[in-house]
Amino acid sequence: KQEVTQIPAALSVPEGENLVLNCSFTDSAIYNLQWFRQDPGKGLTSLLLIQSSQREQTSGRLNASLDKSSGRSTLYIAASQPGDSATYLCAVLNQAGTALIFGKGTTLSVSS
Amino acid sequence: GAVVSQHPSRVICKSGTSVKIECRSLDFQATTMFWYRQFPKQSLMLMATSNEGSKATYEQGVEKDKFLINHASLTLSTLTVTSAHPEDSSFYICSARERGDEQFFGPGTRLTVL
């Protein structure tokens, strides 16, 4: 059974810092991996989607990497801003499945 | 593009009543819709997968008679929580997929059962 783990559970940083969020998954047979942002009480906003054949994706200050063989992905946020404060969720789509399996998320707080 | 809406965004009901939550894909046809539940500080847990015109597939441990799912059209799926109890209070989120593998999520519905 696929399990997704995110470390750390919470992170507080001052504005301007570069930071890395980690995601690991137990079954490497994935179709893709997706990073989402969730603001308190809100739905999910898709940030980056990495196909299993890809190594990384970039969007603005965000860069996500995927090492499928080791079951790991990282989300790199450059020059963090207070507006980046949110919970970041990692989810994988199994090759055999149709639905996403989520980690518990990392709650990020960026102070000004 | 790829916008998914949910209605209502927030609902408070008395124990024993039924609540219906709608999920709509506004600018695309969703061949598959998913319903998730999220408890505080927990991850999203898949409840069921529904394909237009067919019965929903429920995840283990989810009571299909309690959580009724209808996917009557390519743009609308509904989740009805029947005889709701306080332990059903949660954040319910739907997502929709057209033909590719990317899912688009709705804004969620906060259900509080008194």
Image: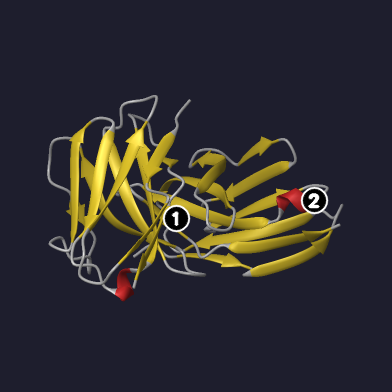
Mark 1 vs mark 2: which is more N-terminal?
1
Check residue A28 in the rendering and tell me which mark sits there, or answer none: 1
Instruction: Tell me if B88 is positioned left or right of A67 in this view.
Output: left
**Would residue B13 be seen by someone viewing this image from the given angle?**
yes
Q: Is residue B109 above or below residue B26?
A: below
Q: Amino acid at mark 1?
A: Ser
In which chain is the residue bearing label 2?
Answer: A
Q: Quadrant of the C terminus of chain B?
A: bottom left
Residue plotted at (70% across, 43% down): A62
Residue at figure coordinates x 32%, y 51% from the top left: B35
Image x and y of residue B4, in percent: 41, 36
Disc 2 target residue? A80
Q: Position of residue B106 (x, y in %)?
A: 43, 43
Which amino acid type is marked by label 2?
Answer: Ser
Instruction: Return the chain for callout 1.
Output: A
Query: Which secondary structure lies at badge 2?
Result: loop
Q: Look at the numbered disc 1 and give the secondary structure of its residue.
A: loop
Q: Are marks 1 and 2 in contact (CB under 8 Å)?
A: no
Say which quarter of the image contains residue B75: top left
